[in-house]
């Protein structure tokens, strides 16, 4: 049906076009954020204070003409402030926390690698969606795995030991005394290694079906010099061992084709007084409640990453990244867990505890 242009709300049309221009600028500037990371521009700006393009060129050895455009794009994005009187650009401490300081708990620049991988895989994902087929996690461009590692690391470092584990029932004391822990779907093993470092008396085992991720996890743990951790290729349905005092799923259960089966195996593998910790993307239980910037990001990621991964696996339940606490509780109950609760939360995560 053709819309009569006379029936258009001109103000709404202008608002729509404005939003699209903002989104297109953000999509384009995401590549510039990564360029800034790889050329050391964010770090240089953080160290220099207010600086001109000429000064930044001297500091970095990058051609000034490129920097002039890059700096202008960041100022237009609101990532830098610009003083026309001195022709200087300034990176605020708050923006430095997110873009320049990799040890910051809110460092987000690495997440743009994740977004970059989606663009690389777009044509193949489109074909799978057209045909109703899944797209396995292992099939993605390797930049996805780098982006996932860098995107989640700051939050895990900031919250896992100091906030999430203390919210579980007696788990910290158990880990301090020495426990056996399984980190299922561990990816590059960031969470696994953090757990092992924090609780040297415990033994932490990381499992993932993706062999390349396990190889990278071993490398990172060796670089950190962590000895009480190991990594093996295994799926969520058949990882070995029993009597685990803690089994963890960090931002991965919703990606699984058979999350009920995965948690049923966890129920069989956890100790009678043990806990299963699910860290999942923050979501309310209804769609209208999730129509906000965080929900937008997660629904987009779910469309091209999480749901295709699930649909590529047996059962293909397709929970999606915005399943919410109620739906996840249903999955846990079906898997045989007697108790299920929200232990804590952040603006980006739900931390849930299931016990036999």
Image (spheres, rainbow, N blue to C red):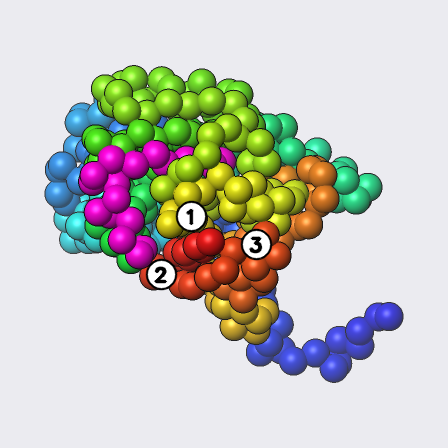
Gap between marks 3 and 1 measured at Cα: 12 Å
Of labels 3 and 2, earlier in sequence is 3
Camera-side residue: 139 or 50? 139
The residue that appears at 54% across and 66% down in the rendered structure is 326
Counting residues from the N terminus, which is met first, the one under dot 2 or under dot 1?
1
Write down the quadrant of residue 219 in the picture: top left
Return the mark for residue 336: 3
In the picture shown, does residue 106 fall above or below 5?
above
Residue 174 within the magenta-colored segment of the rendering: yes
Between 167 and 35, the residue placed more toward the observer is: 167
Q: Which residue is drawn at 40% across and 38% down?
A: 244
Q: Name the quarter where the N terminus is drawn.
A: bottom right
Res 343 label: 2
Specify the label residue 231 is tagged with.
none
Crowdedness near tag 2: few (<14), some (14–19) or many (≥20) residues, C-alpha within 10 Å: many
Contact? badges 2 and 1 (CB < 8 Å): no
Q: Is residue 323 left or right of residue 167?
A: right
Q: Where is residue 73 in the image (x, y as percent from the top left)?
A: 37, 45
Q: Which residue lies furthest to the right in this view?
A: 1
Assess whether mark 1 and mark 3 are in contact (beta carbons under 8 angstroms).
Answer: no
Q: What stretch is highlighted in magenta?
A: 168-186
Residue bearing the label numbered 1:
272
């Amino acid at each position: 049906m053709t819309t009569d242009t006379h029936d258009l709300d001109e103000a709404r049309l202008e608002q729509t076009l404005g939003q699209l221009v903002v989104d297109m600028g953000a999509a384009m500037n995401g590549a510039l954020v990564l360029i800034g990371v790889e050329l050391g521009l964010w770090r240089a700006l953080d160290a220099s204070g207010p600086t001109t393009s000429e000064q930044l060129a001297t500091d970095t050895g990058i051609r000034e003409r490129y920097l002039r455009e890059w700096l202008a794009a960041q100022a237009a994005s609101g990532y830098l402030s610009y003083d026309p009187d001195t022709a200087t650009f300034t990176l605020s401490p708050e923006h430095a926390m997110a873009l320049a300081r990799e040890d910051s708990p809110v460092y987000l620049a690495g997440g743009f690698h994740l977004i970059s991988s989606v663009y690389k895989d777009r044509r193949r994902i489109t074909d799978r969606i057209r045909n109703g087929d899944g797209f396995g996690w292992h099939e993605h461009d390797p930049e996805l795995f780098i982006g996932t590692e860098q995107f989640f690391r700051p939050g895990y470092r900031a919250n896992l030991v100091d906030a999430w584990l203390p919210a579980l029932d007696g788990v910290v004391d158990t880990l301090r005394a020495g426990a056996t822990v399984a980190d299922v779907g561990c990816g590059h093993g960031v969470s696994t290694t953090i757990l092992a470092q924090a609780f040297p008396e415990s033994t932490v085992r990381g499992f993932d079906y993706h062999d390349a991720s396990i190889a990278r996890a071993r490398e990172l743990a060796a670089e950190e010099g962590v000895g009480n951790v190991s990594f093996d290729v295994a799926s969520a349905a058949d990882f070995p061992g029993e009597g685990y005092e803690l089994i963890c799923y960090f931002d991965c259960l919703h990606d699984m084709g058979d999350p009920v089966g995965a948690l049923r195996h966890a129920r069989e593998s956890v100790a009678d007084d043990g806990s299963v910790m699910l860290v999942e993307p923050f979501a309310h239980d209804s769609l209208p409640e999730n129509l906000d910037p965080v929900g937008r990001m997660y629904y987009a990621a779910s469309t091209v990453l999480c749901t295709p991964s699930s649909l590529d696996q047996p059962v293909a339940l397709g929970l999606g990244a915005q399943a919410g606490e109620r739906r996840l509780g249903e999955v846990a109950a079906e898997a045989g867990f007697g108790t299920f609760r929200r232990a804590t939360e952040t603006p980006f995560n739900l931390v849930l505890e299931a016990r036999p």
